[in-house]
Amino acid sequence: MNKPVDERVLPFAPLLHVLWADGQLSNGELTALREHVPLERLDAGTRAALLAWLDTAQPPDPRALDALRRSALRAAADGAPPATLAELGTRIARTHVQDAAALAGVEAVLLAMEAAIGLPGAEAARSLVPEAVPELEAAPSFDASALHRFLNRDHFELRQRVLRILSTPEFTQTDTLDHAAHRELVLQRCRRLAHEGLGALAYPAEFGGLADVTAQIAVFETLAYGDQSLLVKYGVQFGLFAGSIYQLGTRVHHERFLKPALDLDLPGCFAMTETAHGSNVRDIETRAEYDHAAREFVIHTPHRDARKDYIGNAARHGRMATVFAQLGAHGAEHGVHAFLVPLRDEQGRLLPGIEIEDCGRKAGLNGVDNGRIRFTNVRIPREQLLDRFGRMAEDGSYTSEITSPTRRFFTMLGTLVSGRLSIAAAACNAAKSGLTIAIRYAARRRQFGPEGRAEVPILDYRTMQLRLLPRLATAYALEFALRDVIRRFAGTSQPAPDELQVLVAGLKAYASDFAVQTLQAGRQACGGQGYMSVNQLPRLQADTEIFTTFEGANTVLLQLVTKGLLTDYREQFGELRLWNVMQWVRSRAAAAIDRNPIVTRRTDEAHLLDPDFQHTALRYREDHLLDTLARRLRRRLADGMDTFAALNECQDHAVALARAHVERFVAERFHDAAAACEDQQLARPLRTLASLHGLGTIARDRAWFLEQGVLESAKSKAIRDELIRLCQQVRVDAVALVDAFGIPAALLPAPIAFSSDHG
Amino acid sequence: MNKPVDERVLPFAPLLHVLWADGQLSNGELTALREHVPLERLDAGTRAALLAWLDTAQPPDPRALDALRRSALRAAADGAPPATLAELGTRIARTHVQDAAALAGVEAVLLAMEAAIGLPGAEAARSLVPEAVPELEAAPSFDASALHRFLNRDHFELRQRVLRILSTPEFTQTDTLDHAAHRELVLQRCRRLAHEGLGALAYPAEFGGLADVTAQIAVFETLAYGDQSLLVKYGVQFGLFAGSIYQLGTRVHHERFLKPALDLDLPGCFAMTETAHGSNVRDIETRAEYDHAAREFVIHTPHRDARKDYIGNAARHGRMATVFAQLGAHGAEHGVHAFLVPLRDEQGRLLPGIEIEDCGRKAGLNGVDNGRIRFTNVRIPREQLLDRFGRMAEDGSYTSEITSPTRRFFTMLGTLVSGRLSIAAAACNAAKSGLTIAIRYAARRRQFGPEGRAEVPILDYRTMQLRLLPRLATAYALEFALRDVIRRFAGTSQPAPDELQVLVAGLKAYASDFAVQTLQAGRQACGGQGYMSVNQLPRLQADTEIFTTFEGANTVLLQLVTKGLLTDYREQFGELRLWNVMQWVRSRAAAAIDRNPIVTRRTDEAHLLDPDFQHTALRYREDHLLDTLARRLRRRLADGMDTFAALNECQDHAVALARAHVERFVAERFHDAAAACEDQQLARPLRTLASLHGLGTIARDRAWFLEQGVLESAKSKAIRDELIRLCQQVRVDAVALVDAFGIPAALLPAPIAFSSDHG
């Protein structure tokens, strides 16, 4: 039905337009509307015309609606923007209705209609007469470059140098390369890093380095901003291969093999994992049998599942490998030792007895050539046992300062823990890359908005803030926690003390889980753009996915953390412990720990943001989980259950404890660092982020705190509200906070983050 | 220091070996040990020899330890396996010590040492004398093929036929293809499906189909077990492109374009999304201006950000596109309509005015050629407006039964909702693929184990069970929920009723989040193997990642669900609602909903597993979130906040409500289906899975239930314990439960799941 716009209806045109354009009218609603409006105040003709427009059985056709809109628009354009639709209607009425009483009637009906419909005045008026209000990005509260300098103050110049190298065309990102070409390119780039002396920093000056492991970690961290394949190849060669020669070998090995390894004249592998033994590496099955007559070791793979598997550098480039194998001599078993075994000659041909299968394509890291190695009675000279912790003498006798083969093996592993720490740091930086892309995009990308106003940046949406900003805070927290551990690490000789090894295991699990989750959240925040390879997130996601598995699967690492904590617990309480730590953990006075020092109903902001509150809560959780785990284990062991079964029955508890330990440590380090920051312009945003991180950590596990009665319901809700408030506060600085990471666009060439074409 | 094994020490050899082999002795511990043991009962020589072995300042060297082990082993081999190390020591003593008093002394010391050390007897003995005990996989409690038939009973034969086709060499997985070749192969396979008549099933017989949308969804679901690129290409061509012709067009379009589309003689695109408008598609900017003189529409892209973006089939193969554009005619605006716009000629050359940019590589789905389309004044005949919901007459006048342009557009979208439902079903099946691989692997892969025993399958670990088995339960739950909705869908005409659209939006978000998380958990469960392309998980992860974004970003869909629920809420309480639903939501008597019907301290298993308890809890959460959301919105609107800001302030609440709605629906459907299953052999495992799913759903949000006082602390803990118990119960059937999905190895050629080479 086509209704001409009767002149008498014109004052109602704005309201009617909004009514019909909304498109969700029901009969009942219109009936109700008619009942609420004093239609008797209109003259009969006007009333009839208006009622005709309010008949849902006869909806106006699209052209009539458009006519209505245009007449309303003309009136609106003629004067100041109207505050409400009734005001606009009144304005129209005044030019059409001469009679004062009739005019008063129309005005009364307009006001009643507006009230009955429940139109928010300005919003409805804007829906008719859009005003484009560009919203300006508020200026950040601090100087991003000052924060950048503060974050990167350890080895600042070295980091800048690596960034400059990675920003050269020689290192341009290479998503479209084929598999083989990518592998060759990564090798070539690795050589360039070696020539720059960047592979040797951790090693003594005589081998071209600075004897500064923290410098080498700084390089590794910086590489994590670029192609992760290069990062991993670098880590295999200069960390694992060269590191095993240096840490597990002695003078003779250093002199002969270290320099070529660090110059990348001798590409090498680190061959520990086997197909059937990834986590339980103590039980690998590769054999190294000593042949006394020949003064040689015979390296042998007893069966297919005992092949060395996933070995980086093996499929194409490795010429030698550090091979872990069970050492047998004269019928005695001495446990796992490391041997230097040549794989290929200088022309890259496999040596006799060596078979290598290419692992083929992987989800990511396709610039690294992983392979499976099988040894068939490969003979190596006695001197190629890396013999720092166990020696085979000329006369065939074996000696070691460490009696237990298990203990000896874990001591060896303890010297290599800097690799695990490096992975944690790299994971943190990969997460920063993802946050940089997602937050820069979310601050520019606009979608939806208030009726008639410009669309708003998606970072203004609460769910987007909750998705990205607590993770931004955690990236900072992790940065400071890692910095702290790396500094401690510098001051220790290898193997690192148990306590530090426990921290590193925990941080690696925490950081890699965080990176994977953050990159996924970042990808989702960028929608379809996040799925395009050009925007870098796919590569970051695919490459870092394996960080949760290599250098120790996270679940296994977290159980190591727990075992470390249980050992400390025992020592703290002076118990005898031999076979099994738990057998001897005595019941502690219940009152000592079950008294909850932080049950409180305080829900005010000052309390929730107080680092003391956050630390006490996180410390309480850790202590309580430790105490209850010890009791549960002890009960099972006392009932005759074996250790393995007892640990498995409490495995989720053990993992929760390990997480609680790492989370407490990370939160504390961030609050400490924020408190220690002397530049007040920087200290303020850091304190806010530290609060967001700490409170977010508590909130994620608030079910546990509620179960324990540590939080009451009102307080738990207050924490959620406070998180939202903190996110709003951080949102203003969000772009500056990712800019402070200082990742050059050349390393992260995502158009959605850095090009002006996208918005 | 090399200690010979003094004969007097031999009885202590087993205990001493374990002590030193453990490798974690401390001085304090040995001192304590010496104090607990009645050494005075030994003769002086024996005592001295033993003490020498207990001197941590002089640890035995590795060869001495080995000698100790061998002498202990010899004794152990000589007779029945010893139950404890003291027993073994006693056995040795009896052959070495003749004097009865001396023997009694040795036995006393042995027992005291064993007690002091706290060695669990059998476990310690096994550590010395390993017995390989192969653990047999328990038989499942039901017949997997019977369950397979039950799960797939809708369109069983059709599904089998599609599986047979996909298992032919023509459809072999193609991970190593290059980008261009992969695209061509997918097109070719899509043609094959068309020739088999599998693209047309949803359409009337005259176009080659069965007019059965559920049959077409069954095909789509089954394709999801194979290459997801083929799935998406199929969906674009036969779902979106052909579907838009059929649903948005009229007889003339059907006759002219539908058959070529369904035969894939006319490859087509569905061009709605624009660079700047992905979620807010009502505000897309592509123009379709009616030129009355020429009787043509002029399709035009006003600026770069208004290009059609991510359009499947556009970069290479599409010859026509359904293009969504703002229809303008004679100065009037009629909102978004769909137009059929030719893109390429029969030789594949772009037509004048069409520019297409290849989106390039993506994280996954690289067999689909996504592109960006720009139109420069492209003219199409008036008849190529798809005019079911709005017509342009010969005389240039526009008519529609739906007055509001917004309402009209959403009505159009409502006809296309089967695509969203199909994605939900495909996501569920992708998750099933991941679960099949991960669970089959975890049941065979062994790592660690009790001392001296065979390593155990990693699926026996509690954290692994908690990671995989609740997700297995959810895959089943989702399967039944989808089956229910698909059946309802079959009985409705298009557009589907609002209630069904709300459910579909919610299920798509739920299923795609579930798939992404499950594939990630599956990848992690498979460790390094999960990262190898050959094991299929990388492809599944990369391909399905975008399911959370396309066909509606999940966060946006969840807000649609909430808007639907708010509308129902209004209707339920008979309120007037026009502009803004919330303005009129009256406060309901607090007592009605705030009385919590399920506060109870019952923590017994029968109660926790009772579907009524689970339903009441999930229903309560949904009702409470809806009621409180309505109140919060009303308060803000009453205070003069605009709708957009009010909704944003409550966005996390709104999303939680939507999730609660979908989760309640899914849990109910699973319990219903399990209750309705007549085959008792199948009903039992289904009931267990339904309990695991329901309880897991409650447990994930237990913080909320605790905050509301719905759960008390003891009950919350009981739920966690019950979850663990249910996982152990499901573990026995786990492999059979994934086998019942019936995914052929040919479609999922993961060696870790199906080859006998890996274990």
Image: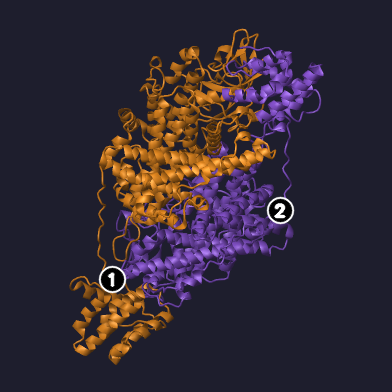
Chain colours: A purple, B orange
Question: Picture quarter containing residue A103?
Answer: top right
Question: Taking A254 as reference, is B64 above or below it?
Answer: below
Q: Residue at x 42, y 30 (%)?
A: B185
x and y percent of residue B370 in the render? 52, 30
x and y percent of residue B412 in the render? 53, 23
Tell me the amino acid under the disc marked 2.
Answer: Ser
Work out which quarter of the rendered image holds the N terminus of chain A and state it.
top right
Tell me the amino acid under the disc marked 1.
Answer: Leu
**Mark 1 → mark 2, Cα distance in angstroms:** 62 Å
x and y percent of residue A149 in the render? 69, 57
Q: Residue at x 38, y 40 (%)?
A: B670
Residue A444 visible: no
Q: Chain of mark 1?
A: B
Depth check: A264 or B555 in front? Answer: B555
Q: In what element is the residue under mark 1?
A: helix
Depth check: A231 or B432 in front? Answer: B432
A436 displayed left or right of B471: right
How many neighbours does mark 1 have within 10 angstroms: few (below 14), some (14-19), or many (20 or more)?
A: many
Which residue is outermost to the bottom?
A: B44
* Residue that numbered label 2 is attached to: A145
Work out which quarter of the rendered image holds the C terminus of chain A and state it.
top right
How many neighbours does mark 2 have within 10 angstroms: few (below 14), some (14-19), or many (20 or more)?
A: some
* Residue that numbered label 1 is attached to: B128
A620 displayed left or right of B537: right
x and y percent of residue B180 in the render? 48, 32
Q: Residue at x 26, y 41 (%)?
A: B680
Question: Taking A125 as reference, is B601 above or below it?
Answer: below
Residue B112 visible: yes
Question: Taking B333 as reference, is B88 above or below it?
Answer: below
Q: Chain of mark 2?
A: A
